[in-house]
Image (cartoon, rainbow, N blue to C red):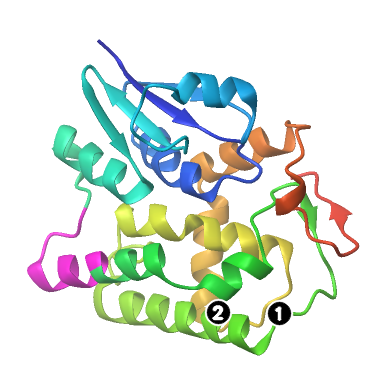
Amino acid sequence: MTMQLIIGNCNYSTWSMRPWLYAHYHQLPIDIVGMNLFSDELLAKLEGHFSNGKVPLLLDGDIEVWDSIAILEYFGEKFPQTDPWPATAAARAAARSVSAEMHSSFTALRNEAPMNCRKRFPGYKLSAQARGDVDRIQSLWRYCRQNFGRQGPWLFGRFSIADAMYAPVVMRFRSIDVELGDIARSYCQTVNDCPSVKQWISNGLGESYIVTEDELDFPGEQLTC
């Protein structure tokens, strides 16, 4: 039986983007079911499952896996050829640490700059707390690239779970003006140039469904790519 990954809208759902990106990047044999967030259809689809009405949700026969990082870990176990974590112990420890920090932190940035692949908001200003989140994220990227990323353009050289975890942050930076250093700008370019990320953005641009709570109350410009 083919695994099924249930996700929300590409335009908004950061949690869905992470496992989708990993699966698409590695061309995993998974059926993707995209549904509108908070819709009756999604609630009906998730009824009887243990994800508390939330996406993403991975179904593998009788096995259910919910929450982005748990799904990514499951992919790594199910498809070890994808090399989900870096090879050395030190790099793996760092990759797990920065992924966990992404999972649990940066509340101000999340709240003030929801992901929206369809719009850019020139002149939008983040609070001091959210700018602190941006600074911390840059320091994490710099630490990874300088210490473990010299063999390629991703955080740890090659694409890993850590990159899937931070891809939605790069999408946020497409939409708002943030001051980034050289390493962060280069890394954002790597993510934006990734064919799988481009496909995710294209999917988002093709959607018309609106999640009001994820739309900034600030004048925005429509993005076309």
Instruction: Give the quarter of the image for residue 40.
Output: top right
Determine whether the residue tagged by mark 2 lies in a helix, strand or loop: helix
x and y percentages locating residue 168 in the rendered image: 53, 56
Whether residue 90 is in magenta: the answer is yes
x and y percentages locating residue 98 in the rendered image: 32, 70
In the image, 102: left or right of 149? right
Mark 2 Cα-neighbour bin, 10 Å: few <14, some 14–19, many ≥20: many
Residue 134 is labelled as 2
Residues at marks 1 and 2, CA–CA distance in whole angstroms: 10 Å
Instruction: Give the quarter of the image for residue 19.
Output: top left
Residue 199 seen anywhere in this rendered image of the structure: yes
Q: Which residues are magenta?
A: 85-96
Whether residue 94 is in magenta: the answer is yes
Report the residue that reaches farthest toward the left: 89
Earlier along the polypeptide chain: callout 1 or callout 2? 1
What amino acid is at disc 1? Answer: Leu
In the image, 31: left or right of 59? right
x and y percentages locating residue 4 in the rendered image: 36, 21
Residue that badge 1 annotates: 126
Q: Is residue 113 above or below residue 67?
A: below
What amino acid is at disc 2? Answer: Val
Nearer-the-camera pick, 16 or 191: 16
In the image, 44: left or right of 202? left
Residue plotted at (91% across, 62% down): 219
Nearer-the-camera pick, 209 or 171: 209
